[in-house]
Image: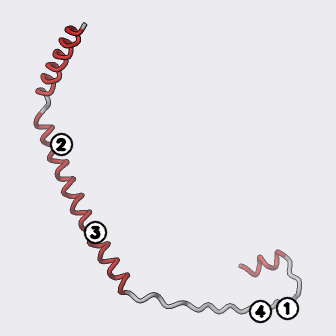
Amino acid sequence: MGKALRLSAIVCGVLVLAACDTIPREALNAYVSAFDEARASGEALTTDFIAARAESDRRDATAAPPAPVAILLTYVPPAEAQQTATDVRLMAW
């Protein structure tokens, strides 16, 4: 049983090595080239993002906080003491 297992492992290994020899080199090289270009573009994009983020953080640190906006609310009591829900809805328009 051990010899048969060893022999089948060797046969499988030889088949795998033979199959690896038939990989189309041009397609593999094109894939590797495209992957390298994508990596270079991604690295450039990441570098630009890091620089922009640092600049944004620097500007945020030196900028004065926005001035508070004062909102004055005044309550004007209605002439009529009781208003219906329809009156309130019409006033909202």
Classify the position of the N terminus by image quarter: top left
For label 4, the crowd category at 10 Å Cα-Cα, with few meaning under 14, some 14 to 19 and many 20 or more, is: few
Distance from the alpha carbon under mark 4 to that under mark 1: 9 Å
Q: Is residue 64 left or right of residue 52?
A: right
- Sequence order check, earlier mark of 3 and 4: 3
In this rendering, the answer to whether 7 lies above or below 25 is above
Where residue 64 is drawn, which disc sits there? none
Distance from the alpha carbon under mark 2 to that under mark 4: 74 Å
Distance from the alpha carbon under mark 2 to that under mark 3: 28 Å
Query: Regarding mark 4 in the picture, which secondary structure is present there?
Result: loop
Where residue 31 is drawn, which disc sits there? 2
Q: Residue at x 11, y 27 (%)?
A: 21
What type is the residue that disc 3 sits on? Ile
| Residue behind mark 4 | 76
Q: Nearer the viewer, mark 4 or mark 1?
A: 4
- Sequence order check, earlier mark of 2 and 4: 2
Quadrant in the picture for residue 9? top left
| Residue behind mark 1 | 79
Quadrant in the picture for residue 86? bottom right
Distance from the alpha carbon under mark 2 to that under mark 1: 79 Å
